[in-house]
Every structure is written in C-alpha cells, then in structure tokens.
Image: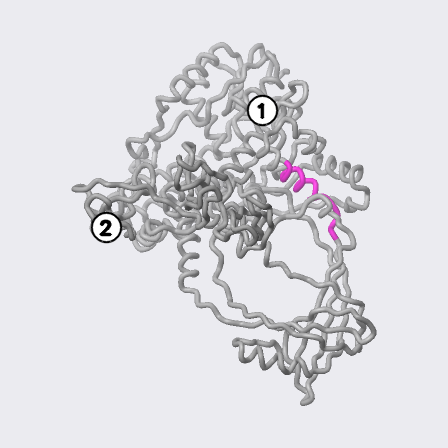
C-alpha cells in the first residue's frame, strides 16, 4: 500500500486488543497494530489540573497503570517510518490520538504521522481509510477537551461541598445531575398526583339478520359532545338508559392505513429497544455493540466488524448500504416488499452530528442465521435487532384496513348516546414480516374487535352492556429506555454519555431500580434540591442542552473552547463564593423499623464505599451492621422461606432463598409475589403480563409487567 510514499514498516495504533487483532489481519505484516487500552493521558486525580487563571490550561498526566503501554508504543514508534492513528471516529477517539502523540512523542524524528478514520471495521473500509489519511482535527480535540475541563470544574468544585454538607463519596456532574433532576421531578409528579375516577361503558349489539354481535364503546352524548362519567351512580343510570335506546348505524368508514418502518438505529434508539425487548442495561448494550463493531472471527479465521460505529445520532445510511439492502429485500421477500424509492431518514436531534452513519450491519449478507455459530447468546440478540431494524427500514409499509362504525343510540325523548366500534385487518404485512418496534407502553395500544359487515342506516339490537371503573394514572417512572429517550429529547448529553450517566447515578445511589424503574433515593432528593437551590445553572435542563450545542460549535470550528469554558465558569465561580456558609448540612440518614440486636437502639440506613447498609444509630459506641435485604414477596418453592434479592461478586442480580446455605434455591429472574393459582408454588415472569409456574407450568395473567426487574434476562 502506498501512502505518501512507500511505507516499509507502519505502526497503527487503536484502542483495544480486539480491534487491533481484526485490523492486523486486514493490513498484513507490513503493519504492526498495537492497542493503547483506551485513554493514556488524563487530568490528575489528586488535584484540579486546570489553571483557571491562565485560559483554563489543563495539566495532563499518564497514569501509572498506563506508563508501560506508553513506553511500548514509544519503542514501537522508533522502528516505524510511518505512524497511523486509527482510534474511534469521534471526538473521544480524536482526543485519544492527540494524547498519544504527546505522551509517546510520536511527532519527533520526522516520521510520517497521519490520522485514519473508518466507521466500520471491514477490509474495504480499512483499506479505503489508509488510502485517504488526514491530519488530526484539533476542533474535535478541543470539543472533547472543553467537555473534560467543564466536567472537572463542576465535579472538583462541587463534590467536596457535597461531602461536607451531605456525606462522603458523593459526586456532581453536568449531565448526571440533570439526569437525577429529571428522575426526581417525575417522582414528585407521581407523589402529588391525585387520581380521578371515570367509567367506561360498552354495549353489545347484534344484527337483526343474523347471530353476529359485537361490542361498541360509548363515546359521547347526542348533540352534546363527549361523555364524562365520574361515579358508579352515573354509570348505572347511563346503563339503564342504554338498555332502552334504539340503535342505528350512522356511519361506516373503511380506509387503508399505511405504516412506515422505523429508522435504522442510532445510539439512543438501540439502547431503548434493547432495554424494552431484552431488558439489557444501556451499559451492557454498548459493551455488546463494541464487541460487534471491533470484530468477530467468522468461518475460516477471517475477522470482520459486524456493525458500523455504535456511537452516533444520525439515522443516515450510505447509498451503497441502502442499495445492498434493497437488493436483499427483493431477492428474499419479493419485489412487493421493496418501495419504489429508498427511504431517507431525517435526524431528529437539534444538535445531531451528521458525520456518522446509523448503526447497521456492515454487510446484509451476514444474516443472524449465518453468524449465529460465532456469537454468544447476548451478542446474537443485539446483532439480530440491529440487522432486522436496518433491513426493515428499507421495506415497504404495512397496510391495514381500518373499519370504523358510528352508532346512534336514541332515547324516546330524543336524547341519547353516540357509540363507536372499530376493527383492523392486516392487508399487507410489509416491513412487519421482519421486524416490529417495541413500545414503552405495550398494554396501551387499542384492543380492537372484529366487526361484522354492517351498513349505514341499519338498525341494531341491544343485547348487553358493561361498565368498568377506571382511574387516571400518574406519569410512569422512568425505565432505562424512557430515561435515555428523555435525555435525547431534551438534548442532554450525547451518544457516548447515555450509558455512563445511567450507571453513575445508580452507583452513587441517587436512584435505585424498583421493578425495572428508576426511583430516587432520599439521598437523590437531598442532593438534587441542594444543587437546584444553590447552583441552578448546573442542573438547569435548558442551560445544559445549550452547553451541548456550544460543544458542537467547538467541534465544527465555530467557537473557541476557552471562551465557552470561561462563559460557564465565571458565573459558576460566583455561585461558589460563600457556598460553604450558605449551604446547611443535611442529614440523609434513613430510619428503619429494626432494632439493634446488641444494644437495642434504632437502626438506620447508611452509605459506605460498598453501598448502603443498615447500622446501629449508636455508632461509634455500637458498631453493629446488617446487610440490606430486599424481599421479593415470593416464597421459596422448596422450603417456604422468603426469596430475597442477592448479588454475585460481579454485582449481577439474582434471587435466592433467605435460608441459604441450608436451602440453595436460586433463579436469575425476579419471582412474582403472587403464587400459582393452581398449585400455590412459585410464579416466574412469562412475557410482559403473565406468570408461569416453576412447578406445574400453569400460565396466568398478572397485574403490571411480569418482566425481570433488574433486566438482562437471558
């Protein structure tokens, strides 16, 4: 390969060993490919590392753990006549390359030093990148540097204050603190919500010419608009009048409703769908996607990346990829499943970066069935999602025939009710033949009925009626999927930040998961309220979104990074002045109903370096501690004791008998508190709304979602 002259020996630097192995096989012996193992330089841990008086000049250092890696790269560089920086194609990757140059002194001795960028690790993409190298993009480097400096200023200045005023070990951050605020404000909406009673009425109607019947919903009053029934008394009165009404079909509408497929995945939608379908956490989804991107060995030892780069906010696909997918659709499903023109998807986010493609398979020929032998179960699940979503995005719409029937229920005094019934019949499956996107509210979709062929003006016969009491519901708590969606919609963070943000707010115990949904802890409420009161800009959603836009302006060369940091820091420093005097200390100790077994004092919940625990309120005189036991409400099928939540050494959640080690029953799925109605044994989640008995196999409906609360079910 000739790049700016003949290269006798090229050194290629990437981040990970897996990526190095894949690229090394593609480039051959002419190139040595080494891994930096991620970042090799950062701000120091022991001090601020940012000179706020001299244009926020950062001081970087190489961590002791990375000194050997840097030394090895420096040695390898002396043996090469050309160095290629092939780190990831984003700001973080650009910054890693910049740090590599400085730490390993790569820009000395007159060697050729170039940056190569590819969005998929395939032989063609890598070869093309090496034929078209470029210089380092300092705008991207400065955008990442500005983010790092801003985060250090916020964290280093606020965290010590939280330690003094709340408890040790806490942290604050531009994005994480806003995420906590979003969860806290939703919880307060739920706590202040007042449910309103309402009733739904339905009438069973039949045709005079046959035995066919159907249910129609009461939707209004004749000549007086919508119907609102707020009590059982009113419902009973309406039911009695419905029984005496004359029913006539007033309108029959039949129309075809097309439904277009969803766009191929971007980072946020991939995380949301993996959470909804498989209960994968955002962090796990990104780890699996990284593996699929960096390369998998297929067949006779050839190694290739299976998906394009997984940190992106653009749904755009390359024209060549679209053409390949359309050819596959026509050959596999038939020409009727391929629209006349390719679908082009617009970016939704205000500040989305168009440089990247959507997340798609690098080759549609690598079907899930073909690569299945080379992937583990979790990798296959995610790859199948990505493959199906990308292919379906270029398939024809599904077409449903929707029939809507309007019915007049007339009383003798000329008053009465308006009813409506509808049915849907699939005429053409289109993209749904391959893939259907999940929803955040799977039980919220219309439950449509099958209607007989009725005609306008036809008289119907009253057969029965039904009333159902309902209550308005508070807004739902956030799941991993819906919180990522909220962050994206509010322009908080970027594709690379969603997963670490969700991880850190749980690690700091500002929020916990209950039944798969985020609930703020007392600590989360306290820290949020303190920041909102004394540092409103840090946790202001609009301000944080605008800051993300300014970071994007730095990346595009429109803003100077020092000016952006200064505009943030000057008012922030003003808020910091006198903060220690203004902010009062807050007690976050949580009372329990337990009594210390050694001294009889009340026991409280405390937090330490290994998480929360129960401790005697008499500390330090009494140092008794207990683990926090989370009961599932279910009973062990083997001995009848409580089944409690447990964690492995690697922090993976499972559920086991509280009498361990005497009883060793365990399951990786959260048991349901309701026992089997047939044999009284343990019910485990079965789908989203059902439970299945672990003993007799009986399947039964349960209230709410029956999925594994902690996610990551296999």
Q: Which residue is mark 2?
A: 602
User: Is residue 74 in view from this perspective?
Assistant: yes
- Residue in the picture at 54% in, 23% down: 18
The percent position of residue 407, horizontal first and vertical second, equals 72, 75
505 or 668, nearer to the observer: 668
To which quarter of the image does residue 599 belong?
Answer: top left
To which quarter of the image does residue 533 belong?
Answer: bottom left
Secondary structure that dominates the magenta span:
helix
Q: Which residue is mark 1?
A: 133
Q: How many marks?
A: 2
To which quarter of the image does residue 382 belong?
Answer: top right
367 or 446, nearer to the observer: 446
- SS type, badge 2: strand
The percent position of residue 157, horizontal first and vertical second, equals 29, 42
Upstream in the sequence, badge 1 or badge 2? Answer: 1
| Crowd class of label 2 (few under 14; some 14 to 19; many from 20; radius 10 Å) | some
User: Is residue 553 in view from this perspective?
Assistant: no
Q: Are marks 1 and 2 in contact (CB under 8 Å)?
A: no
| Relative to 468, 544 lies left or right | left
Q: Quadrant of the N terminus?
A: top right
| Relative to 384, 90 lies left or right | left
The percent position of residue 163, horizontal first and vertical second, equals 26, 43
Query: Residues in magenta?
Result: 384-398
Q: Residue furthest bottom?
A: 413
């Amino acid at each position: 390969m000739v790049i700016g002259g003949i290269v006798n020996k090229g050194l290629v630097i990437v981040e990970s060993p897996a990526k190095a192995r894949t690229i090394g096989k593609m480039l051959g012996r002419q190139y040595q490919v080494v891994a930096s193992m991620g970042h090799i330089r950062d701000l120091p841990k022991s001090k601020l590392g940012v000179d706020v008086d001299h244009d926020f000049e950062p001081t970087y250092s190489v961590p002791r753990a990375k000194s050997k890696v840097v030394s090895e790269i420096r040695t390898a560089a002396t043996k090469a006549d050309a160095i290629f920086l092939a780190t990831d194609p984003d700001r973080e990757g650009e910054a890693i390359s910049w740090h590599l140059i400085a730490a390993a002194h790569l820009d000395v001795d007159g060697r050729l030093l170039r940056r190569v960028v590819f969005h998929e690790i395939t032989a063609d993409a890598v070869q093309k990148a090496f034929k078209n190298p470029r210089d380092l993009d300092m705008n991207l480097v400065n955008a990442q540097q500005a983010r790092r400096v801003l985060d250090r200023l916020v964290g280093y200045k606020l965290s010590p204050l939280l330690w003094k005023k709340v408890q040790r070990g806490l942290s604050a951050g531009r994005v994480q603190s806003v995420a906590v605020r979003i969860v806290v404000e939703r919880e307060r909406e739920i706590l202040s919500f007042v449910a309103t009673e309402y009733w739904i009425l339905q009438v069973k109607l039949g045709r005079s010419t046959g035995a066919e019947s159907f249910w129609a919903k009461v939707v209004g009053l004749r000549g007086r608009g919508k119907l609102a029934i707020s009590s059982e008394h009113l419902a009973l009165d309406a039911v009695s009048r419905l029984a005496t009404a004359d029913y006539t079909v007033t309108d029959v509408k039949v129309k075809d409703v097309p439904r277009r497929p969803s766009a191929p995945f971007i980072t946020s939608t991939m995380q949301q769908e993996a959470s909804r379908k498989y209960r994968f956490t955002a962090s796990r989804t990104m780890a699996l996607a990284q593996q699929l991107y960096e390369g998998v060995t297929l067949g006779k030892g050839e190694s290739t990346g299976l998906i394009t780069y997984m940190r992106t906010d653009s749904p755009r696909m390359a024209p060549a990829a679209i053409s390949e997918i359309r050819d596959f659709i026509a050959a596999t499903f038939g020409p009727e499943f391929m629209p006349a023109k390719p679908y082009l998807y617009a970016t939704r986010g205000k500040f989305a970066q168009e440089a990247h493609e959507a997340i798609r398979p690098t080759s549609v020929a690598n079907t899930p069935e073909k690569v299945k032998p080379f992937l583990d179960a979790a990798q296959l699940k995610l790859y199948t999602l990505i493959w199906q979503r990308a292919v379906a995005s270029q398939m024809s719409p599904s077409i449903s025939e929707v029939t809507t029937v309007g019915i007049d229920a007339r009383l003798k005094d000329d008053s009465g009710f308006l009813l409506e019934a509808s049915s849907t019949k699939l005429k053409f499956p289109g993209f749904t033949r391959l893939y259907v996107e999940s929803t955040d509210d799977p039980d919220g979709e219309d439950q449509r009925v099958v209607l007989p062929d009725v005609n306008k003006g036809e008289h119907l016969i009253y057969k029965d009626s039904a009333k159902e009491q309902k209550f308005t519901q508070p807004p739902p708590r956030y799941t991993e999927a819906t919180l990522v969606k909220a962050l994206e919609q509010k322009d908080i963070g970027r594709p690379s930040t969603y997963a670490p943000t969700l991880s850190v707010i749980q690690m700091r115990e500002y929020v916990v998961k209950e039944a798969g949904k985020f609930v703020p802890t007392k600590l989360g409420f306290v820290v949020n309220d303190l920041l909102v009161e004394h540092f409103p800009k840090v946790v202001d959603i609009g301000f944080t979104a605008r800051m993300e836009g300014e970071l994007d302006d730095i990346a595009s060369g429109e803003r100077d990074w020092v000016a952006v940091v200064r505009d943030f820091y000057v008012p922030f420093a003003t808020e910091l002045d006198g903060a220690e005097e203004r902010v009062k200390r807050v007690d976050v100790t949580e009372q329990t109903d337990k009594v210390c077994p050694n001294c009889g004092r009340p026991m409280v919940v405390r937090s330490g370096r290994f998480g929360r625990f129960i401790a005697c309120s008499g500390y330090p005189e009494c140092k008794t501690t207990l683990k926090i036991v989370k009961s599932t409400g279910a009973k062990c099928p083997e001995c009848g004791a409580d089944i409690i939540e447990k964690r492995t050494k690697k922090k993976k959640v499972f559920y086991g008998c509280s009498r361990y080690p005497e009883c060793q029953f365990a399951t990786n799925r959260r048991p349901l508190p309701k026992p089997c109605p047939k044999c009284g044994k343990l019910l485990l989640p079965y789908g989203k709304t059902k439970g299945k008995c672990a003993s007799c196999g009986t399947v039964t409906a349960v209230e709410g979602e029956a999925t594994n609360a902690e996610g990551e079910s296999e």
